[in-house]
Image (tube, helix red, strand yellow):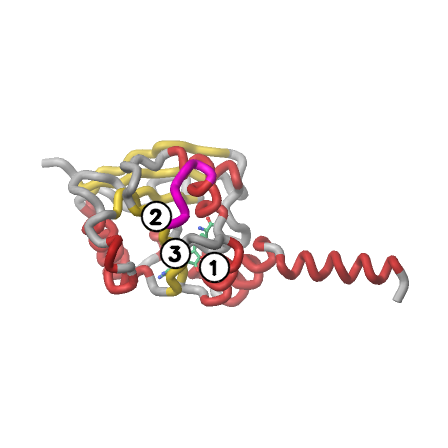
Amino acid sequence: MTAEQRSSLARLHRRRRSPAWLFFRRFLAHPLRLASVLESSSALSRLVAAELSCDPGDYVVELGAGTGPVTRALLAAGVPPERLIAVEIDSEMAAFLRQSLPGVTVIESDALALEQALPRESLGRVGAVVCGLPVSLLPAAQRGELIGAMLSLLPPGRPFLAYTHRLTSPLPAAELGLEGERRAFTLLNLPPASVWAFRPLSR
Ligand SMILES: C[S@@+](CC[C@H](N)C(=O)[O-])C[C@H]1O[C@@H](n2cnc3c(N)ncnc32)[C@H](O)[C@@H]1O
């Protein structure tokens, strides 16, 4: 084999192991579940991490971690790996997360079975929930269930974060008894994206 052939084989091998390629392949397998051809950009991931507000020692739960761009940004923002729980339904992506982010608790599970899936020691000690699932595409009943599960993990009044490619809110907040606030927007994502925070409507 020539040097040129070896180097193009190595390139092919690297591409096959890249998170972007994995994400694209899994998108082809489950387009609605991923709802995006590309993983989140580092700019969007940093914006999500910057909106996190919880106490040191709290657990942070990320739902729909995918190939981990937001997980990595959370770690870079100072969340200790042993306090970070990444939930992902896709077994290939969960395996990739486990292998590429040692120390992070990766749970291969449907986020709709959240409470049963989380480690016991984290229950009552979750300070932040980041939702990476395409919530706007979920059927109403599942969406309501997911929102209830996320809010029940958090201290009363604490919002959960969600990011979206939509120009408007990913959730019909008032209809769901929530208050939604767009916290950040970036053009440095394909497509451009916003970070939202949702908490129960104060009466
Ligand atoms: C829009 S992608 C976001 C991935 C990653 N967080 C990012 O920012 O690139 C949505 C992710 O949620 C995962 N997902 C979809 N439905 C899920 C469910 N019910 N439970 C857990 N993960 C789910 C998908 O497999 C996918 O990895």
Helix, strand or loop for disc 1: helix
Q: Which residue is mark 3?
A: 105
> For disc 3, does the CB lie below 8 Å from ligand 1?
no
**Toward which corner of the image does residue 108 lie, by quadrant?**
bottom left
Q: Residue at x 24, y 59 (%)?
A: 120
Spatial distance from mark 2 to mark 1, Cα to Cα?
A: 15 Å
Q: Amino acid at mark 1?
A: Arg
Spatial distance from mark 3 to mark 2, Cα to Cα?
A: 8 Å
Mark 3 or mark 1: whose residue is earlier in sequence: 1
Where, quadrant-wise, is the N terminus in this rendering?
A: bottom right
Q: Percent from the top left, x then y, of residue 78?
A: 41, 37
**Toward which corner of the image does residue 105 lie, by quadrant?**
bottom left
Q: Percent from the top left, x then y, of residue 90?
A: 44, 65
Spatial distance from mark 3 to mark 1, Cα to Cα?
A: 8 Å
Say if 153 sits above or below 141 in the image: above
Q: Which residue is mark 2?
A: 83
> Is 81 placed left or right of 114 in the picture?
right
Q: Which residue is mark 1?
A: 98
Q: Residue at x 46, y 62 (%)?
A: 94
> Is 80 placed left or right of 38 in the picture?
left
Q: Residue at x 51, y 67 (%)?
A: 29
Q: Amino acid at mark 3?
A: Thr
Q: Look at the image and give the residue range highlighted in magenta.
A: 76-82
Q: Residues within 10 Å of mark 1 (few under 14, many from 20)?
A: some
Mark 2 or mark 1: whose residue is earlier in sequence: 2
The image quadrant in which ligand 1 is located: bottom left
Say if 75 sits above or below 120 in the image: above
Say if 16 sits above or below 134 in the image: below
Residue furthest to the left: 203
> For disc 1, does the CB lie below 8 Å from ligand 1?
no
Where, quadrant-wise, is the C terminus in this rendering?
A: top left
Q: Percent from the top left, x then y, of residue 22?
A: 57, 60
